[in-house]
Image: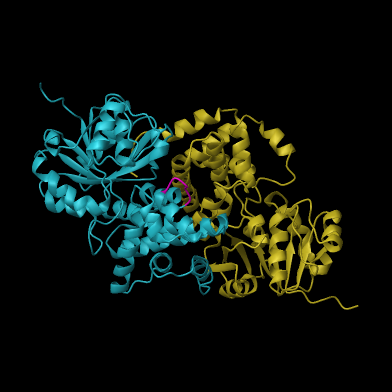
Chain colours: A cyan, B yellow
């Protein structure tokens, strides 16, 4: 039997990978989804469910899930949605099966290695002759999979990739913008998770909406400070993948990172929070990496430093946030 | 009996004027508050309450409220908090009693006349020899008066005014930044109310957090587009008085403008909403003024136009927001 021709392959069957696959399948695309766990693939194929990562959602009957990378060897578009900690390893295993003409886009929102290595840097290194890009935006998976509208951003140095992915991913309820600043787009998605933990802490302490708005505003300024140091364009942070994602995640009870902040603020231990979750809150590792980088390069990132203190140094969250709010007066 | 020496006079005993007065009185300042209505002044002075504009809140016993502008004639700092529609009239009546050395700051978040006249322009015209400035930020009054932390921004061309008001207004739970872009600071506070109505509409329709984040992101871009046309600095919109206030108001059930959006989205008529409120939602008039200005100057402001259509032209809110989400794809 000839293998079906797929329009796109989605690598990673977490909440976001499963959601993109569902959105595209409903829009009429042929999608092949890759899962790390055989149980997940089996459940998607036979019960049209993914009860580990996207509980309670009915998936399309014609969405196919595989665990074998060889089945992706004729697909022209790939989106990588695995957690950043597994990004390098997954790419290593996938690489031999990627066909020469395939475009590859990372949708991971974290760093793929020490020294703030971005996922797309891994892609560029491993696939020097391919078109690569990133996908990032205010995209709470559970809202999108249940039919709510959203916008997102595809960025690449290659305009053809941008146009092709815009056309492939867009539908009436999912509007995809295009951009060329890969670094800024990717950093927005990663760094906002630190602010989401801070936002969760603020909400957990009941500090209110004025305080949260203050955190988001100063959080964006902090993201830009580091971003510009890493050669991102400041402008990108004011768009869909920066501000948009930041606003969305920093206050949503649907965000795993916000949840981590809420739970530490109410006295839970980080290790207990991690143990009790099936999914990774990217912001924990990101806070660690960014804090270390900032120390080494002498960059003052007060919110990151406060979140790091609460997560890893047992600082009282109420004291940490109060200190943030009362730093010396200055011109904006 | 000699009149007490007041540190600051607050003109306008609405929710925000009463809140600033309370905050400052608690911080040890001598504050004289001005109310338009004699009943309000009497209640503040004898019952330490303002049940019309800030129901259920206990005010400090040593906060004094007056209705006579003559009592403000020895005060060196004035903050004007009246609704923008009454700004000109109030300033006209107050002017003869303002002493020569007084600094005057507007905290009104709307336009004071046709052609997008800003309140501080009225101040500059009426008080050409005084220092004038503006105060604006993510400051939901009810949160601040009940003890939650917040930040705000004072802007003026005059650095002395900025430093003096920063020192006078700041306390442990209210941190005040300083800036010099009066136009941008003032426009942020006014224009964000249009987006707050849009945010309320989105929430009233149950569109979710991704959609709201999209609205906020595109809303900020729209505010900047008009702001730059009006000679504001783009950068100011990314700070406390732009993004901060926008984030805060666009999703808060404590915002009157958000409430207007929510209620029209669920089918209430604008005139009924206006009739049922004791306070003015500034965003209604601002939407009208900005929409007319944009038409006259040929500036494309899609969100403002959508809000205008829903408020004044009977456009279905669901259709208006759907059209916003599905505008043609483009580079960001």
Query: Nearest the camera: B69 or A235?
Result: A235
Say above or below: B103 vs B193.
below
**x 70%, y 72%: residue:** B102
Query: Nearest the camera: B208 or A169?
Result: B208
**x 27%, y 63%: residue:** A230
Q: Residue furthest bottom?
A: B2
Give the total number of marks visible in the rendering: 0
Residue B293 visible from this viewpoint: yes
Magenta stretch bounds:
A251-255
Q: Quadrant of the C terminus of chain B?
A: top left
Residue B156 visible from this viewpoint: no
- Residue B20 lies, in percent from the top left, at 68, 63
Q: Is residue A138 magenta?
A: no
B252 to the left or right of B69: left
Q: Residue furthest top?
A: A1
* Quarter location, residue A274: bottom left
Q: Residue furthest right?
A: B1
Say above or below: A136 vs B233.
above
Query: Nearest the camera: A274 or A224?
Result: A274
């Amino acid at each position: 039997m000839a293998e079906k021709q797929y329009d796109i392959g989605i690598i990673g069957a977490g909440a976001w990978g499963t959601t993109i696959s569902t959105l595209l399948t409903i829009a009429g695309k042929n999608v092949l989804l890759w899962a790390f766990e055989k149980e997940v693939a089996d459940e998607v194929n036979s019960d049209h469910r993914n009860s580990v990562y996207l509980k309670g959602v009915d998936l399309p009957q014609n969405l196919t899930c595989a665990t074998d990378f060889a089945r992706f060897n004729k697909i022209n578009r790939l989106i990588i949605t695995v957690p950043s900690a597994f990004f390098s390893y997954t790419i290593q295993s996938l690489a031999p099966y990627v066909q020469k003409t395939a475009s590859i886009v990372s949708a991971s929102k974290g760093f793929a290695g020490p020294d703030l290595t971005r996922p797309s840097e891994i892609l560029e290194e491993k696939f020097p002759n391919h078109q690569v890009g990133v996908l990032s935006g205010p995209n709470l998976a559970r809202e999108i999979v249940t039919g709510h509208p959203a916008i997102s951003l595809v960025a690449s140095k290659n305009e053809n990739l941008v146009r092709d992915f815009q056309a492939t991913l867009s539908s009436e309820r999912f509007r995809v913008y295009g951009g060329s600043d890969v670094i800024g787009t990717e950093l927005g998605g990663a760094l906002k998770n630190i602010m989401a933990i801070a936002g969760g802490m603020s909400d957990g302490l009941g500090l209110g909406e004025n305080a949260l708005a203050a955190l988001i505003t100063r959080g964006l300024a902090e993201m830009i400070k580091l971003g510009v140091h890493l050669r991102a364009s400041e402008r990108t942070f004011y768009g869909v993948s920066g501000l948009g994602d930041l606003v969305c995640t920093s206050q949503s009870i649907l965000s795993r990172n916000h949840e981590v902040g809420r739970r530490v603020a109410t006295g839970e231990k980080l290790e207990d929070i991690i143990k009790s979750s099936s999914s990774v809150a990217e912001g924990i590792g990101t806070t660690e990496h960014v804090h270390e980088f900032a120390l080494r390069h002498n960059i003052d990132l007060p919110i990151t430093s406060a979140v790091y203190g609460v997560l890893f140094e047992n600082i009282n969250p109420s004291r940490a946030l109060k200190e943030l709010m009362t730093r010396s007066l200055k011109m904006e």
